[in-house]
Amino acid sequence: MTARNTRVARRASAAVGLAAAAALLAGCAEELPTPVADEPFEGPVLTMEQETAVVQDVAGVLDKAAEENDPKALRSRVGGPALEVRKSQIKVAEERGDDSLVTQIPTDLRAAIIPTTETWPRVTYTITQPTENLEVPRMVAYQQESARDSYKLWSWVQLIPGTTMPNFADPEAIGSEEVAPDDDSLAVTPADAVARYADLVAKGTDDSEHADAFELPGESQDLVKRIQADARNVREAETFDTADGRYRLAFAARDDPLTVRTSDGGAVVMGVLDGNVRIDVEEGGTIPPLTETQSALLAGEDETNELYVEYTDQVALYVPPAGSEDPIRPLGYSHVAVAAANEIPKKRNTDREESEE
């Protein structure tokens, strides 16, 4: 029996009991024991069977939208940053005539993390098995806005190869606690952790004041290494220097990351970074798109001496409990361009809090 059915049965049982008590009191004056209210339910908000059904239902919508090249089909079961990214991927796939750059979200699960929150919005998380072509597992978040809404795919990241995931509570018996964005039981609040990571992504380990708070993977690439390597490759090109080129980038964290408690008192935080790259060279020069995705987003626009690209980056971090000497660890990320132009706009997606090199 699910938690919901259990509560319904309890309410029905209580109603029958009260009716019987009223009938007895009408017939005699014998004192009856005072009913004792049931203990409030505490435990996972979904069963594993329900979680699997959510994953399968969302996958069906993702497949249909991809097959029909129809971003509108996503809205029934995709929201948040996942909707922005998936719409961009479908647009790119249609322009290229090739869906190889569309992220696969496997339905075979390695683990599920089911919180105990009984209010809304509610979020559940899964960790997938590797894809058929042996791509790394994903961590995926599904959010339900209200009791009448379906769970929607909210965010996903590719886990960094070799990363060690923290432990969570038993998803079927106990469930894991949801953590608020401003919760102070962690080394830093979830919102601060994502904001500090955004600063590190934009400035790199040499220039960010938050670099010492993070432990980046040794051999594998996380978002910091990827962004900084991309910038370095362009800046160090001989033709770029000759053309008096400038390469600037900015990343800013969005509010209200999703956070779930780990067994050691820490938490896994899934957040979103808005980012942009701005490249320009001297008048008369031209800058071609640097990737196939950028080329598809530009859709044949004439090249100019400016290139602007916007990103919606999804990230996952492990944040230790307060008092711990352990660092914050990046667990995974998704780095996807969602817009491109051959002119740098005055209004950009990071204007609320910009970090530049």
Image (cartoon, rainbow, N blue to C red):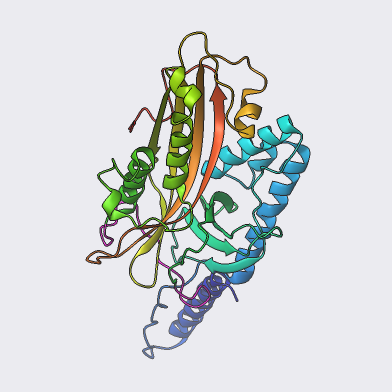
Q: Is residue 321 left or right of residue 17?
A: left
Query: Looking at the image, which is closer to me, 281 or 195?
Result: 281
Of residues 90 and 99, the one drawn nearer to the viewer in this rendering = 99
Which residue shows up at 49% across the image and 46% down it?
314
Q: Position of residue 18 (x, y in %)?
A: 47, 77
Locate the N terminus and report the quarter of the image it occupies. bottom right
Q: Is residue 167 above or below residue 159?
A: below
Furthest-bottom residue in view? 30
* Total tally of numbered discs in the picture: 0
Residue 183 sits above or below residue 36 on the image: above
Q: Nearer the viewer, residue 326 or 315?
A: 326
Residue 268 location, x and y as percent? 41, 60
Residue bounds of the magenta highlight: 169-187
- Relative to 45, 194 lies left or right: left
Quadrant location of residue 56? bottom right
Residue 301 within the magenta-colored segment of the rendering: no
Residue placed most toward the observer, 335 or 18? 335
Asked whether residue 176 is drawn in magenta, I would say: yes
Residue found at x 50% / y 22%: 239
From the viewer's perspective, is residue 25 above or below residue 151? below
Residue 193 in the image, given as x and y percentages of width and height? 33, 51
Residue 62 in the image: above or below residue 50: above
Dominant secondary-structure state across the stretch colored magenta = loop
Name the side, left or right, on which 166 lies relative to 293.
Answer: left
Say which quadrant the C terminus sits in.
Answer: top left
Farthest residue in the top direction? 284
What residue sits 22% from the left and 66% below the top?
Answer: 323
Q: Name which residue lies at 66% across and 28% down.
A: 296
